């Protein structure tokens, strides 16, 4: 498990594995609702679990099951929304196949003559 490197306490590692097994599917469904893409949802769940693993010392203090549920679901929601913000930056760009083909010989002539070899 890749998350084990982020957790230094054996008790926290066991608790993390329990959280992972218990909430993984629910987190995926929530992320997929937000992102409308299974691959992005998987990445969001992974991002959320990395954050949870990094904060296991805090997460392990949560005793109530409902509080833990809200914590992990909020973590995956935040990860999913972060992914939507990241992908918005790239979807606004012109797709490569739609970009105009530009080949300007005068540019290359100018660029090559100004270079110092």
Image: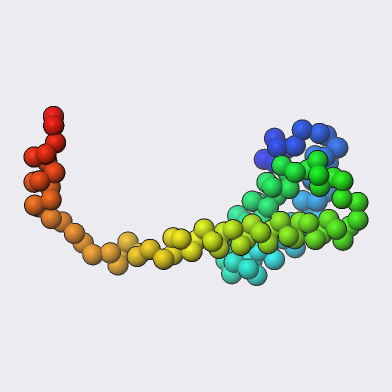
Q: Is residue 48 visible?
A: yes
Residue 67 placement: quadrant: bottom right
| Residue at point 13%, 32% (across, down) | 116
From what the image shows, is residue 98 above or below residue 16?
below
| Residue at point 73%, 48% (across, down) | 52
Along the line of sight, which residue is nearer the eye, 106 or 103? 106
Q: Is residue 41 visible?
A: no
Residue 72 placement: quadrant: bottom right
Q: From the viewer's perspective, tell me whether residue 106 is left or right of residue 65.
A: left
Picture quarter with the N terminus: top right
Picture quarter with the C terminus: top left
Residue 49 location (% of width, % of height): 70, 49
| Residue at point 35%, 64% (across, down) | 95
Color scheme of the displayed model: rainbow
From what the image shows, is residue 52 above or below residue 32?
above
Q: How many marks?
A: 0
* Residue farthest along the top direction in this orientation: 117
| Residue at point 32%, 61% (across, down) | 96
Q: From the viewer's perspective, tell me whether residue 23 is left or right of residue 64.
A: left
Residue 30 location (% of width, % of height): 69, 66
Q: From the viewer's perspective, tell me whether residue 39 is left or right of residue 27.
A: left
Residue 110 location (% of width, % of height): 10, 46
Residue 45 location (% of width, % of height): 66, 55
From what the image shows, is residue 37 above or below residue 44?
below
Along the line of sight, which residue is nearer the eye, 18 or 81? 81
* Residue farthest along the right direction in this orientation: 64
């Amino acid at each position: 498990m890749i998350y084990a490197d982020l957790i230094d306490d054996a008790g926290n590692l066991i608790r993390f594995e329990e959280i992972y097994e218990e909430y993984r599917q629910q987190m995926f469904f929530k992320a997929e609702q937000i992102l409308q893409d299974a691959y992005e949802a998987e990445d969001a769940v992974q991002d959320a679990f990395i954050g949870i693993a990094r904060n296991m010392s805090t997460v392990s203090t949560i005793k109530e099951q409902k509080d833990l549920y809200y914590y992990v679901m909020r973590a995956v929601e935040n990860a999913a929304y972060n992914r939507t913000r990241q992908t918005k930056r790239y979807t606004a760009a012109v797709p490569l196949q739609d970009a105009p083909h530009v080949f300007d010989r005068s540019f290359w002539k100018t660029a090559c003559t100004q270079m110092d070899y």
